[in-house]
Image (cartoon, grey):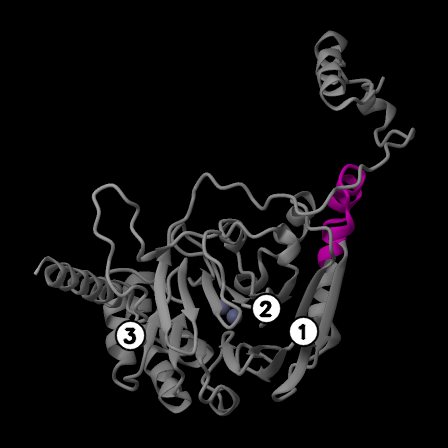
Amino acid sequence: MNRTRLTMVGTLVIGLTIGFAAAHFGGEAVPVVHSETADMSPVKALSDRDVYYPGTEDLAPDEIRVVALGTGQPSVRPKQAASCFLVELGNGDKFLFDIGSGSHERIAAQKIPYDYLNKVFISHLHVDHYGDLASFWLGGTVMNRLVPLRIWGPSGATPEMGTKHALQRMQEMYVWDIATRAGFVDFRGGELEVHEFPFDRVNEVIYDENGVVIRSIPAIHAQDGAVSFLLEWNGYKVVYGGDTYPNKWYIEYAKGADFAIHECFLPPTLLVKKQGFTPLEALRVGSQAHTSPEQFGKVMSMVKPRQAVGYHFYNDFDTEPESRERVRKTYDGPLSLAVDYMVWNITRDGIRVRMSVVDEEVWPSPALKKKIDVEPTDESPFSDFTLSGREPFPNVVGPIYEEINKLYGTDYKPGP
Ligand SMILES: [Zn+2]
Ligand SMILES: [Zn+2]
């Protein structure tokens, strides 16, 4: 009798858990049940949980984890950075799709060593899709990325409108940063490996390594030079759609994907009401430059993915219901309307959607590899003018050096 009762309680707990996840996070995918019965004990840790704590869960060899790290609009806000999705595969490979403004801190919150995060795919060159690249690139050199940062991005209508040109200029823009940082840290991670590919290639392979194939398809957004990506691995297909007007390539090549991400902009009504757009501007931006919820739903009803994900709108208690209602006019399949830190685990059995719990105290990645000390040169980087302003405080700095020398058996001396 007790046993029956416990099983019933366990089943009830699991039932409630699933119901809560579906109602709260908008996940309508097939739920995955993680334990037969819930452990009931007043003193033991719970065996199952409804949230994801970054850095605490293994990824199974045949599993994919996708984390939304930027789901908002071009102007970032505390709740939502601009576009960025992390795709982690069971073979250990990790890919960033877009790295929009504000997304770097969300990447850091994943507690992933920077050495594992050296592949970035940029859908187009709007700041909300690659605005945090410089911070991630140069910040990564200080945080132990000791391998080059590899970036894939489209060409534009002219060479100056392409990814290669933009990233050359980015390196020029940060010439002072590079010159000064390179003298202090092991700068191997400062090397940029840029792969520009033609924006008009249709379903062509742009990446093929370690059993992972990534293809590019054109997008229709602003002007030539916007694309979407399709990642294939182990028989899975994950699609990352950058900004676009609904297009035939996405519909054709994303078809039947396990996981299909596509923009789903605020409806024009809310652009007028909440953001002060004029009606014409709202229509042009919300349904011509971008994809409205109804258009998003139409696309997904043709793609029929195992899980559809809409993003690129300020997703709040007073906007999500209207967006969802409008998507539901044209699509009735599995749907998540993403906010930052939503996470999906994709397996053959199901797709589980949860929210991450972020550790505000987290430090960016721990060191993976031994650093190489950069040899100080005799040549001062300062002019005589700047040097003349130094206050060396030998009685203060001397003991700091002595302390380190004693701890590590070294014999360093402060400069003059
Ligand atoms: Zn854009
Ligand atoms: Zn955008």
The residue indicated by pointer 2 is: 91
Tell me if mark 3 has few (under 14), some (14-19) or many (20+) residues whose alpha carbon lies within 10 angstroms of its own.
many
Give the vertical position of 114 relative to 19 (above or below): above
Which residue: 53% across, 54% down?
107
The residue indicated by pointer 3 is: 28
Q: Amino acid at mark 3?
A: Glu
Looking at the figure, which quarter contains the N terminus?
bottom left
Query: Which mark lies nearer to you, 3 or 1?
Result: 1
CA separation in Å, label 2 and label 1: 8 Å
Q: Amino acid at mark 1?
A: Asn
Which residue: 19% across, 61% down?
10
The residue indicated by pointer 1 is: 210
- Residue 99 percent across, percent down from the top left: 56, 61
Q: Locate residue 227: give its quadrant.
A: bottom right
Q: Amino acid at mark 2?
A: Asn
- On whether ligand 2 comes within 8 Å of the CB at mark 3, the answer is no
Give the vertical position of 268 relative to 332 (above or below): above
Nearest the camera: 191 or 364? 364
Q: Earlier in the sequence, mark 3 or mark 1?
A: 3
- Residue 59 percent across, percent down from the top left: 49, 63
Give the vertical position of 292 relative to 134 (above or below): below
